[in-house]
Amino acid sequence: MNRDITFGQYYPGDSFVHKMDPRMKLILVLVFITAVFLVKSLYSYIAIALFVIVAIWGSHVPAKSVLKSAKGILVVLILTASLNIFFYSGGERVLWHWWKISISVEGLFFALGMALRLIFLVLGSTLLTLTTTPMNLTDGMESLMKPLKAIRFPVHDVAIIMSIALRFIPILIEEVDKIMLAQKARGADFESGGLIKRARALLPVLIPLFVSAFRRADELALALDARCYNATPNRTKYKVLRFGWRDAAGGIVSVFLIGLIIAINYSFWGLFGITWTV
Amino acid sequence: MSIEVNHLSFTYSPGTPFAKKALDDVSFRVAEGETLGIIGSTGSGKSTLVQHLNGLLRLTSGSIRIYDIDLASKKPDLKRLRSTVGMLFQYPEYQLFEETVLKDVAFGPLNFGYAKEDAYELAAEAIRLVGLDLDAVKDKSPFELSGGEKRRAAIAGVLASKPRILVLDEPTAGLDPVGKREILNLVAELKTSFVKTVLMISHNMDEIAEHCSRVLILSGGRLIADGKPEDLFRNEEFFAGTGLRLPHTALIRNMLADRGIHLDGNTLSADALSKAILNVLGGKK
């Protein structure tokens, strides 16, 4: 029923990006997000766009799949863009004015810039989840959060909780399908009526779902106990993360990218001669 | 005819790389009063087939008629269909959700448009019918019941809408031997008094042999056999190819035949088999 949840789903592959160390990818995404917020001028937008295009190309994930997962933010995108257009204050070249609302050329550019930033953010972070299995992702996070152990932060527990949560999403979706069928057979109607009626109609699905989620949690806890699982500090891993040449390359590219953007923003006005800024 | 299925085919996710043909040109008819067993290995299309009978899967090719309801029509009356065909899924106890057992059992009738008092009356009747103590359980939370009681309460939830056809998808899965026997006896009892026609999916050949008057065998989405259990279960070679095993009673009969002891008549139920064996033994003395 709800099978088309593509947002952030893993897209199996064997590409450069797939093979990178998840830790490097996580760092890269963080650097990328910072870079996106530093972006100010047209050239830096182009730099970011190029980076995104190269990254998608290097992942061998079809651009269609990447864009499809970004479709989810369309509503947010339209909302923020229109708010920015109508409520941008301080624009000088005003095109249209009514009461406290005015549309200016600066406002339009600002809205466009914001929208582009949002799109880049989503594309960058979905590329991470598209090319990294949830297991690898949590492994990477665990490894990156290791320094937090010094302040007694339960890094390993947080990581295992995260991977269990991710693992259970498809199981719970299947469960929802089953329960919905059973209640439909008893005459439940999920498709007609207004918003409130539909929300109420979901109660016979949600309650059994919660009950079964708790039951599964209990069973899983018992199964973990039965295998003497505990988060001892000396657990070894089946697959050890290794930092390779791809990661070094990724690191160099990211340093270069952020350096370039800072350079474009602050130092080389004269060099590029840009007057069009947002 | 209570059920008529003609040339039913169904494919999951058609037109995608995940497309999977689950049913392939299945046709059969069920007369009122039959107890029909549906068997087949995992993935043979049993569940897909019975979900069609209840309108849970939309008909895409072929036709289905249940009494006077034509499922091939543009807008079949799903509410009337679902109150006519009661459907009990695997592990039905996981569908319980209301505050009290009585309210939960009345969920079906209320959805099918009965007035509140009528719905509660039907619910009370269904609870008694499945052998639960009405006064003891009606105000209890369904989650306080024991496993077997929960399953009975869930069955009551299906029966409360007074279906003429009852479809059971592995009704005894996950129960202990006593619980299994109780549920099957309940189904047999319902069959004589309450519902007209019963369709039962099961992996347990002994249950099918003992309780069904007719058996459909599905394999890879195709209907490969349709007949009386005493005829079907006699053909050992045919069964070897289906990945299913014969019921124990038929196995014993065949083993005896290999040793030169031939039993007469229908010996599929344990009682009939033991009587036939005693007869042979008595005859020899």
Image (cartoon, coloured by chain):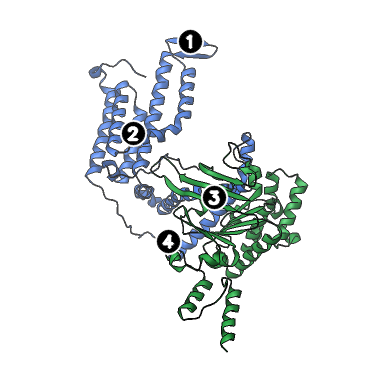
Chain colours: A blue, B green
Q: Earlier in the sequence, mark 3 or mark 2?
A: 2
Q: Earlier in the sequence, mark 4 or mark 1?
A: 1
Q: Earlier in the sequence, mark 4 or mark 3?
A: 3
User: In the image, residue B43 lies at what x, y percent?
Assistant: 46, 55
Q: Is residue B201 above or below residue B245?
A: above
Q: Are marks 2 and 1 on the same chain?
A: yes
**The disc labelled 2 sits on which kind of residue?**
Ala
- The residue depicted at 34 percent of the width and 26 percent of the height is A39
Q: Earlier in the sequence, mark 2 or mark 1?
A: 2
User: In the image, residue A150 lies at what x, y percent?
Assistant: 38, 51
**The disc labelled 3 sits on which kind of residue?**
Lys
The residue where tag 4 is placed is: A230
Question: The residue tagged with tag 3: helix, strand or loop?
Answer: helix
The residue where tag 3 is placed is: A178
Q: Are marks 3 and 1 on the same chain?
A: yes
Question: Residues under labels 4 and 3: Cα distance?
Answer: 33 Å
Question: The residue tagged with tag 4: helix, strand or loop?
Answer: loop
Question: Residues under labels 3 and 1: Cα distance?
Answer: 54 Å
Q: Chain of mark 2?
A: A
- Residue A176 in sight in this render: no
Question: The residue tagged with tag 2: helix, strand or loop?
Answer: helix
Q: Quadrant of residue A197?
A: top right
